[in-house]
Image: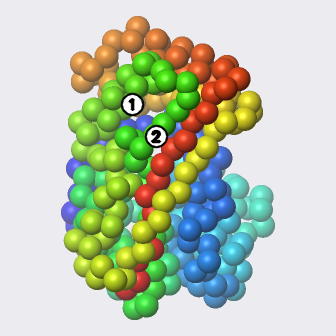
Amino acid sequence: MPEETANYIHGHHESVLRSHAWRTAQNSAAYLLPYLEPHMRILDIGCGPGTITFDFAELVSEGSVVGLEYEGGVLEQARKGAKERGLGNIEFVVGDVNGLDYADNTFDVVHCHQVLQHVGDPVQALKEMRRVVKPGGIVAAREADFNGFTWYPENEGLEHWRDLYIKVARANGGEPNAGRRLHVWAYEAGFPRENIKCTAGTWCYADTEAREWWSNMWADRTLGSVFARRAIESGQISQDGLEDIAATWTQWGEQEDGWLVLLHGEIVCRK
């Protein structure tokens, strides 16, 4: 089985899981929802704390969902959440998208969200996703595109944060502008071009509550997540520099006219 060559840039600091637990099928996988049917079996790769996975399980009430995560520590939170929501058609397992432990043609839908930007070989990952989906089934992916992020007002500190993030992510073996590449990777993984549907989605943080939540979360991530350690170890920035970026995030979040949009590429591929 191919081994993962990239390092996950964020780790599982509380601030990272805070972000992941905010995600739902509606705000992070709306492009896929029209394709789901109650009887389907879904594999959700990189499920994290399981909040998108929970929604899938409710939508395929006559089927089942498997949430798969590379780091098993977060799955305790996912299993607890599934129990609290009374979901009996869901299970969580440890696994690696580079070599999925499932037979060919097992699932109706194989989904990932914010995964391919963090792996060393996204084409291999998509090949595995394609292998385990049934003929006629769907492989779906949604990935951020960091150079597509935009904000108001103009802010040199946030420009510096984005430049730093992109450098650190690529040094870790990932591709932070994955969103614009998804359709190319899917074609290289074996999907005919006519079977690849491309869309784009956004997250927008513009009201007071959303702006404060996002800015405070990223201020905490800048100082406390694995990203901080790797940024310093790689010589890209000092601790003082990270503290300046964290302060920039906090200050931006306090601006009444602050507005921020994150661009994502999306693909739905038929096998």
> Is residue 27 something that shows in the picture?
yes
Image vertical order of residue 206 relative to residue 183, above or below: above
Residue occupied by mark 1: 162
* Numbered tag placed on residue 149 in the rendering: 2
Q: Residues within 10 Å of mark 2 (few under 14, many from 20)?
A: some
Instruction: Locate residue 207: give its quadrant.
Output: top right
Image vertical order of residue 3 relative to residue 184, above or below: above
Q: Nearer the viewer, residue 131 or 243?
A: 243
Q: Nearer the viewer, residue 79 or 17?
A: 17
- The location of residue 240, given as percent across then percent down, is 41, 8
Separation of marks 1 and 2 at Cα, in angstroms: 9 Å
Q: Are marks 1 and 2 in contact (CB under 8 Å)?
A: yes
* Numbered tag placed on residue 253 in the rendering: none
Residue occupying the point 30% across, 70% down: 186
Q: Residues within 10 Å of mark 1 (few under 14, many from 20)?
A: some
- The location of residue 124, given as percent across then percent down, is 25, 66
Quadrant assignment for the N terminus: bottom left
Residue occupying the point 56% across, 71% down: 32
Q: Amino acid at mark 2?
A: Phe
Colouring style:
rainbow
